[in-house]
Image (cartoon, rainbow, N blue to C red):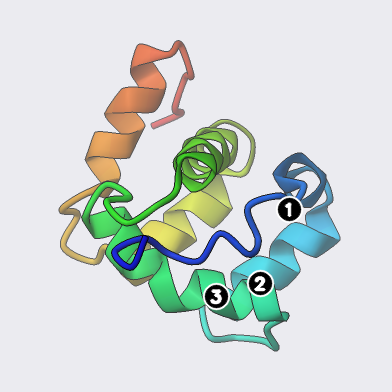
Amino acid sequence: ADDKYTDKYDKINLQEILENKRLLESYMDCVLGKGKCTPEGKELKDHLQEALETGCEKCTEAQEKGAETSIDYLIKNELEIWKELTAHFDPDGKWGKKYEDRAKAKGIVIPE
């Protein structure tokens, strides 16, 4: 279990955050270093870069599902936020395309 991220926040209601613009923007401001962080937001911020780069290697099963749900949701419904995240965490475009390709394979249309 030492090689996994904490499961302390695994039961967080992601759908509620994703579907609430104010909450979502608050989390995005946190991870992008533009605003205050809640304890779970800080946890996300501390590990987001590594999790994205490694394909969620140290994630618990719940975190892997949550990451996939979140990424798919952002690509489908909040493309501007997704672009801001990838510009911040993936300036060289190393992994963003992989997640977009996976979303496309699920039938999510990404506007050019």
Vertical placement of residue 60 versus 90, above or below: above
**Mark 3 crowdedness (10 Å alpha carbons): few <14, some 14-19, many ≥20:** some
- Inspect the image, locate mark 1, and give the three-letter code of the amino acid beneath it: Ile
Quadrant, the N terminus: bottom left
Question: Circle 1 is placed at which residue position?
Answer: 12
Marks 1 & 2, CB-CB < 8 Å contact:
yes
Residue 26 placement: quadrant: bottom right
Q: Residue at x 80, y 54 (%)?
A: 21
Point out the tag, 1 or 2, that comes first from the N-terminus: 1
* Horizontal side, residue 74 vs residue 64: left or right: right
CA gap, disc 1 and disc 2:
9 Å
Question: Circle 2 is placed at which residue position?
Answer: 40
Marks 2 & 3, CB-CB < 8 Å contact:
yes
- Inspect the image, locate mark 3, and give the three-letter code of the amino acid beneath it: Glu
Point out the tag, 1 or 3, that comes first from the N-terminus: 1
Please give the label number shown on residue 43: 3
CA gap, disc 1 and disc 3:
12 Å
Q: Residue at x 50, y 75 (%)?
A: 45
